[in-house]
Image (spheres, helix red, strand yellow):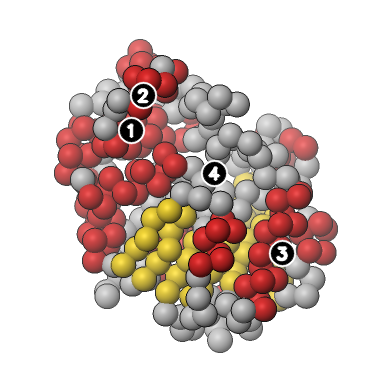
Amino acid sequence: MAKNKLVAPVLKWVGGKRQLLASLKPLFPKGYRSYCEPFVGGGAVLFSLQPKNAYVNDINAELINVYKVIQNNVEELIECLGHMENKSTFFYEIRDWDRDREKYQSLSDVQKAARIIYLNKTCYNGLYRVNNAGEFNSPFGNYKHPNIVNEPVLRAVSNYFNNANIQFTTEDYSAVLRNITRGTFVYLDPPYDPISTSSNFTGYSKGGFGREEQIRLRECCDELNERGIKFMLSNSATEFIQEQYQQYNITKVQAKRSINSVGSKRGNVDEVVVTNYEPNR
């Protein structure tokens, strides 16, 4: 299946890999029958590779719903987005839909997906963030001309989803990894181990991803390795992460990190790419 350059992320997502694709591409394995991404987020790697067979997962059910709606109801989604206004009063009205759980559950999947895309395009810094109650809480961004309805990209992504064999799930990453078979290439992009207390960000979903989770993920990678399944993992270049994956191939890459509560600490930082295979093999 020929790759379509219009197939690209429809959402801005914290930790997105769009800026790192040039560094990651030389590290991908040459051949695999299927692709698995348990922490898909904005999907930059998925959309760059455009595999014919893929297992796509994220614990954030709102995000997976967006992808399913793009696959199954893209024209209805585009129409719904076309009625959304870049105004503060309208923004907070839409943002507060999830404060009334009963009312929110009565919304259609298309309405929920349009809400997430709209908030992502118009909130401050495009930051998807929820509070402890699971309610979206990023403020209005005051952008003059946000691209709320990117019709060519939405239709291109929908076309890709419908012409490939893609299984969407929203469950714990370990459950996804247990079910994949040899011949599948796994790309893991979990919430990063924080390089400092000010860089920690856990607002993608309720709960967090502390060092116990990082260890559990490394144990899952060990199991993949024992089963002969190729994996690539991205994470911050902390001593802890490098110690966890010391038996594997570690490549350092430079990434621009913008999520930090201290402005002076934003900028280029080292990240690690871990593989259990020699790159380009």
Q: Report the residue marked by disc 4.
A: 14
Residue 104: which disc? 2
Marks 1,2: beta carbons within 8 A: yes
Q: For residue 209, what is the image quadrant?
A: top right
Residue 103: in sight, yes or no?
yes
Q: What residue is drawn where x is 33% and y is 33%?
A: 112
Q: Amino acid at mark 1?
A: Lys
Q: Position of residue 90 (x, y in %)?
A: 32, 17
Q: Position of residue 245 (x, y in %)?
A: 75, 67
Q: Residues within 10 Å of mark 3 (few under 14, many from 20)?
A: some
Quarter of the image for the N terminus: give it. bottom left
Q: Report the residue marked by disc 3.
A: 219
Q: Extreme bottom residue here?
A: 281
Q: Which secondary structure, mark 1?
A: helix
Q: Amino acid at mark 2?
A: Tyr
Chain-order first, disc 1 or disc 2: 2
Q: Residues within 10 Å of mark 1 (few under 14, many from 20)?
A: many
Q: Position of residue 64 (x, y in %)?
A: 40, 47
Report the Cα–Cα distance between label 1 and label 3: 35 Å
The foreground one among 50 and 109 is: 109
Marks 1,3: beta carbons within 8 A: no
Report the Cα–Cα distance between label 4 and label 1: 20 Å
